[in-house]
Each structure stands twice: as C-alpha cells, then as structure tokens.
Amino acid sequence: MKSKIIITGGTGYIGSHTAVEFINEGLEVVIVDNLSNSDISVLDRIQSITDVAPTFENIDLTDRVKTTSFFERHKDASGVINFAAFKAVGESVQLPLQYYHNNLNILLNVMDCMDRFEIRNLIFSSSATVYGLPDSFPLTENSKTKKPTSPYGNTKKIGEEVIEDFSKVAKNFKAISLRYFNPIGAHSSGDLGETPTGVPNNLMPFITQTALGKREELKIFGKDYDTIDGTAIRDYIHVVDLAKAHVMAFQRLMKNEAKENFEIFNIGTGIGYSVLDVIASFEKTTKQKLNYSFVDRRSGDVPVLYASTAKAKKELGWNPKLTLDDMTKSSWEWEVKKNIL
Ligand code: NAD
Ligand code: UDP
C-alpha cells in the first residue's frame, strides 16, 4: 500500500510544489487547507502536472473539533508536513494576536491529533528569521537564535520550541524543522507559483509585477549597506529544490535515520546574492528591462543573510540544483502565464 502523507497548507505556494514532489515519489497526498491564502484551482494544476488528483479537505486547522475529525479520517497517514500558517511579516506587526492565534493553534491542534492517532513524523516550516540579526556568517543550525523582529517570526521560534519540548517526552515522535531562507521561483510547467494578495512585500513578485506593468517601479530598500554593491544580500532558494528537501527530510524520518527526535536543517543554497544581482539575473533571463529606484532601508531588514547548508547536504543528502537564473526565469514565466490564464 502507498504511504499516505498529510500536507497542511498544501494549496499554498510551497505546499503545492511539495505536493507535486511527494506525488512524483509515489506517495498518496492528502491536502488540508482553508484556502485563506490560496485558490482551489491549484488542485487542478497539481493534477495536470502529476496526473494525480490529491485528496483535498477544506478545514480551518484552528478549529479543534474539525481538525480532530479530519485526522480521524486519515489516521493511517505516516506523517504530516505542516505548512499552514499566515506568513506576511508586516501584517503580523499590525495583527499580532491573529498571527499567534492562527499559527500556534494550527501547530498545537495538528500535534495533538498526531499524538492522539499515533502519527509519528512531522516536518515543520520554519524560517531563517529565527536567527534575528546574526552575529556571524554563514549561519549554521547551531548559530544562536534570537527573538525575531516580527510576531510572524516569533510564531516560528515558538513553534520550534513547542516541537522540541514535545519531542523530549512523546513516544516515537520525530520531527524535523526546516529553516527556509528566501524561497522564490516557480514550477517549470508554469502552472504553479506564488500568488501574493495585494501589493507584494517580497522582492521577486514585486519584480515580476513591475516588469508586467502592474507596478510602476521597484523600490530598492537601501544602497548604503556594507556589501559589494550597497544593496542587501539574501540566500535565495528555488521553491522546487525546497520542496525536494521536504521529501528527503520525510524519507530520513521514515527510514529511522534521524539522529535526534528533533532535528533542524537550514534550507538555502549557501550563496548570498544582492538585490542588484537578482535584478541583473532577471533582466538577463527574461530580456525585460526593469524600472527601479533606490529608497531608504526598510526598517527591520538585516544587511546580509545566508546559510551554511553543510548539514542538509551531509545528513539529508540534499543538494539544491537550480540557479538564480532558473529562479528569476521561472518566476517570470509563472507571472506571464498566470495573467493570461
Ligand atoms: P502560503 O500562504 O502560500 O501557504 C500557506 C497555506 O496555509 C495557504 O494555502 C493558506 O490558505 C493555509 N492556511 C493558513 N491558515 C490556515 C488555517 N487556519 N487552516 C488551514 N489552512 C490555513 O505560504 P507559503 O509561502 O507556501 O509558506 C508555507 C509555509 O512556509 C508557512 O508556514 C510559512 O510561514 C513558511 N515560510 C515561508 C517562507 C516564504 O518566503 N514563502 C519563508 C519561510 C517560511
Ligand atoms: N527588497 C527591496 N524592495 C522590495 C522588496 C524587497 O529592495 O520591494 C529587498 C529587501 O530589502 C531584502 C531583499 O529584497 O533585502 C529580500 O526581501 P524579501 O522581502 O523578499 O525577503 P526578506 O529577506 O525580507 O524575508
């Protein structure tokens, strides 16, 4: 029988790409999502890529009763990949209670059900934001974590602490937290990608929307950082490579290869690119000319952030393969296709 995996938030940006990778590996995928930040049409897109229609249930995972009955129906699952969360950093500063309520209650309900129905394996979506303003680079999993600068980031830090505490006492429970750096890019089919609501906060969707004429110009936040060209540096990771990291982390748990009940892995490429590097790659791969200007630094931004990915490479056997050019090109193809669909 096929191994069954529950993907919460599976119609979202990263969850949908991960669903494709799990289906490609021959697993049975069950997606649970309340569609608060995604569209039901994603299911058809997953099917058109994989020829498989994943099971889908529309449930608000903060609803304890409905979440419990969902897990009762799928108690034969071998694991959970927990993507479901609100993720807008700026919005979380304005709406802290909504962010703590949603992100933490989802995790608590999911873990409570895993405990009750003896589902042993959890992969958690964490973020490089748990490192706060780092003291040194590259960031390893042993680098000090700090209180993140936003309530959103804090839900990731608290989430990891909840999982760690539970993993110390729960029988046979194993979890892996993946700390994503900057996920960008889209599926090579052009059928899956990021769909931000309203004005994008993140760099890549702002670039593609500007090139398409939806936005007048990109504002580059800061040109006086102590970096090679004065703009801030990030570790961009292609969403398909990121999705594959979830499959490898899950396989590690299934094969009982985890060295501890709770493990943490950085997921980036280990390479830092500046904002101007991203723009240069975008202009090269898409032949589009981007309008941009420089403005003041964005408050809360760190100058430089990139990962050491040595642990993920060694322990998970995961090696990101897609380049910055693959990321900018696929993001553009998705933006164009999405707007003519
Ligand atoms: P996304 O918003 O596209 O996907 C999250 C999904 O969760 C959405 O489909 C949304 O409808 C669903 N959801 C939210 N609240 C829910 C609830 N109460 N019940 C059921 N479903 C609910 O976000 P994404 O970019 O795919 O991110 C996935 C995960 O990765 C999130 O946990 C996010 O915090 C984390 N993460 C994302 C990034 C990034 O840059 N995209 C970086 C680091 C970590
Ligand atoms: N950025 C920018 N203009 C924008 C959006 C982002 O200059 O409109 C910069 C931002 O300052 C950071 C990088 O692009 O240096 C990546 O930002 P993003 O919001 O995508 O991710 P973050 O690293 O902040 O999570």
Image (cartoon, helix red, strand yellow):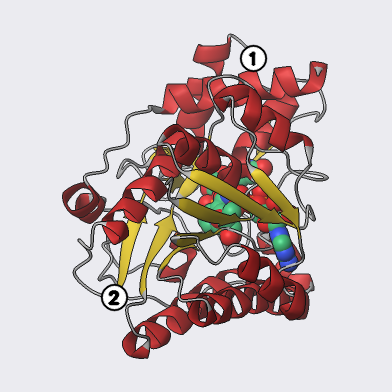
- Identify whether 327 is placed above or below 8: above
Q: Residue 289, labelled with which disc? A: 1
Q: Residue 261, labelled with which disc? A: 2
Looking at the figure, which quarter contains the C terminus? top right
**Measured from the top left, where is residue 125 in percent x and y?**
50, 60
How crowded is the residue under tag 1: few (<14 C-alpha within 10 Å), some, or many (20+)? few
Callout 2–callout 1 Cβ contact below 8 Å = no
**Measured from the top left, where is residue 34 in percent x and y?**
77, 58
Name the residue rendered at 70%, 24% in the picture.
335
Q: Residue 37, labelled with which disc? A: none
What's the distance in space between the residues labelled 2 and 1, CA to CA?
A: 49 Å
Foreground residue among 164 and 216: 164
Name the residue rendered at 50%, 62% in the picture.
76
User: Is residue 296 visible to us here?
Assistant: no
- Identify whether 259 is placed above or below 7: below
**Measured from the top left, where is residue 287 in percent x and y?**
58, 8
- Identify whether 73 is placed above or below 282: below
> Outermost residue toward the bottom?
169
Nearer the N terminus, badge 2 or badge 1?
A: 2
How crowded is the residue under tag 2: few (<14 C-alpha within 10 Å), some, or many (20+)? many
